Image (spheres, grey):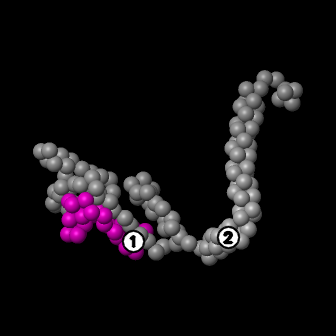
Amino acid sequence: MRHLELAVQYGQPFLFESVGEELDPRIDPILERRTHFEGSQLMIKLGDKSIAWSEDFRMYLTSKLGNPHYSPEIMGKTSIVNYSVTMQGLENQLLNVVVGHEREELERQFKELVSEMSSMTQQLETLEDTLLKTLSTAQGDILEN
């Protein structure tokens, strides 16, 4: 806790490694950013101590769990980023690099197809919204329109 207090006070990043699905309740004030002013100084209360809060402070939590299930309270207090790497994902990345190096034309076509699929997905959503709006405002027999 002393190292965490120093990191909070001096605006240094702090890393908790191998976190499980339950977090220590002593870090709740940090997760919730329960800060208050004492005079002109922004402070946070950790345990029974008030510590100066630096806006540069960042806290990172890492977990070795493949798919951790955190409580809704923790999910609301944190931003969760999944950096898991799968063999299939690595294979796809390597394949893209090799194809880009060996066959630049294929990579260009692939990028065009991805862009086209994206625009078509947006168009599909627009058409679905239009259809639903038309159906919800239709009067009488809906098959006439």
Q: Are marks 2 and 1 in contact (CB under 8 Å)?
A: no
- Tell which circle, 2 or 1, labels the residue nearer the N-terminal end: 1
Residue at figure coordinates x 67%, y 70% from the top left:
101
Q: Would you place residue 14 above or below residue 142 in this image?
A: below
Location of the N terminus by quadrant is bottom left
Relative placement, left or right, of 59 versus 115 is: left
Label ID, residue 19: 1
Q: Secondary structure at mark 1?
A: loop
Q: Is residue 88 visible?
A: no
Residue at figure coordinates x 25%, y 59% from the top left:
11
Relative placement, left or right, of 3 versus 78 is: left
View extreme (top): residue: 139
Residue at figure coordinates x 76%, y 35% from the top left:
131
Q: Would you place residue 25 above or below residue 86 in this image?
A: above
Relative placement, left or right, of 80 versus 85 is: left
Residue type, mark 1 in image: Val
Residue type, mark 2 in image: His
Q: Secondary structure at mark 2?
A: helix
Query: Hey, which quadrant is residue 50 in on the image?
Result: bottom left
View extreme (left): residue: 39
Question: Closer to us: mark 2 or mark 1?
Answer: 2
Q: Which residues are magenta?
A: 1-28
Q: Nearer the viewer, residue 37 or 89?
A: 89
Residue 103: horizontal and vertical position, in percent?
A: 73, 68
Say which residue label 2 marks.
Answer: 101
Instruction: Estimate how packed mark 1 is, as few (under 14), some (14 to 19) or many (20 or more) residues with alpha carbons within 10 Å.
Output: some
Residue 98: horizontal and vertical position, in percent?
A: 68, 72
Label ID, residue 49: none
Q: Would you place residue 22 above or below residue 112 in this image?
A: below
